[in-house]
Amino acid sequence: MENLNKVAEVIKNNDDFLIASHESPDGDAIGSMAAVGHLLKTMGKRFSIFTADKIPDKFKWINMPGPVNNEYHPGRHSWIIVLDCGDLERSGKQLSGMAAEPILNIDHHRGNPEFGQVNWVDTGFSSVGEMVAKLADHLNIKPEGPLAEAIYLAVVSDTGFFSFGNTSPQVLELSARLIRNGINPGLINAKILNQWTIEKLHLHGMALQKTLFYLNGKIGLVSVTRKMLRETGAAPEDCEGVVNAVRNVKGVEVAISLREDEPDKIKFSLRSSGDVNVQLMAAELEGGGHKNASGGIIAADMDRSRERIIEVVARHLA
């Protein structure tokens, strides 16, 4: 509660904020940025929204409270509100390398080094969106309309539509409040889920046909190469979700996806269920995330990355 109080005091006593999140923003990042913007707008505060990468087309339906900028101009704001970043580097080279204003750090990742001047880091929350809802209550702002939709996007994104282990009674109670306040989960869920392109469908089909299994089926690994992306016409962001298909295979305890961004830059994602902690595995590979969903980058080619990640995951499972 003390850190929440500090966050609220910074927001109440200052004006002209920069709202930011991590590179390759996901549903929690985008929902949280939109929600904080709606909070500030309700309070009559000035703000700008920054993200190092453009918001993916599949999230273009969300009501953003202001324009989203891809350039950071140091010294123009009173505070930077950084959301859903396990460390400042995840916000991108511009912000992490040039941040001139004090930082208000709101996050729920394990291992966050508390890089801000004010830090509210709590791994007990399912998502930063849930934390923003708590902040809204603290500021006596009712979560309804676009604010409620943004919070809902963040929450369902990081709980896997309430299927992950971080789905708590508090998350379900919050979602019930949002519905009572007027949101339509059926319509919003369709906007979130029904965004596949034909190219993405073909990419997932091609990749999943070549899924590899290790350790008597306890590990499932799917790889996406740049050649696959070219052949299907898919974009890198179309890889999202392919790892979850592997996790759905009976007997798989850890699902792995590898995406070739460059010849020696492989993005990895790890997914598990229950008590299997992939965050510890990702940390060994200089990545991070959550107990059941983590990821990072390996500076090696696809073959060496596959060998390295299988070695780490198999050792942890053994």
Image (cartoon, helix red, strand yellow):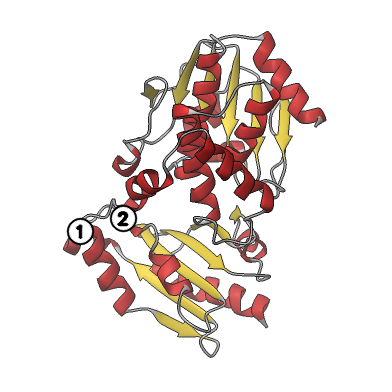
Q: Residues within 10 Å of mark 1 (few under 14, many from 20)?
A: some
Q: Secondary structure at mark 2?
A: helix
Spot occupied by residue 135 in the image (x, y as percentages of width and height): 66, 28
- Front in this rendered view, residue 124 or 75: 124
Is residue 92 in view? no
Spot occupied by residue 179 in the image (x, y as percentages of width and height): 50, 40
Q: Is residue 194 above or below residue 70?
A: below
Residue type (three-letter) at the residue carrying disc 2? Asp
For the residues marked 2 and 1, what is the alpha-carbon distance in whole angstroms?
A: 8 Å
**Horizontal placement of 90 versus 108: left or right?**
left
Spot occupied by residue 8 in the image (x, y as percentages of width and height): 70, 20
Q: How many marks?
A: 2
Q: Quadrant of the C terminus?
A: bottom right
Q: Residue at x 52, y 80 (%)?
A: 252
Residue type (three-letter) at the residue carrying disc 1? Glu
Q: Quadrant of the rendered structure where residue 142 is?
A: top right
- Front in this rendered view, residue 216 or 259: 216
Q: Residue at x 62, y 65 (%)?
A: 278
Q: CB atoms at circles 2 and 1 under 8 Å apart?
A: yes
Q: Secondary structure at mark 1?
A: helix
Farthest-out residue, right: 2
Q: Quadrant of the N terminus?
A: top right
Farthest-out residue, front: 180
**Horizontal placement of 31 versus 13: left or right?**
left
Q: Residues within 10 Å of mark 2 (few under 14, many from 20)?
A: some
Q: Quadrant of the rendered structure where residue 226 is?
A: bottom left
**Horizontal placement of 38 versus 290: left or right?**
left
Spot occupied by residue 12 in the image (x, y as percentages of width and height): 67, 12
Is residue 292 in view? yes
Mark 2 lies on residue: 238
Q: Residue at x 61, y 54 (%)?
A: 288
Mark 1 lies on residue: 199
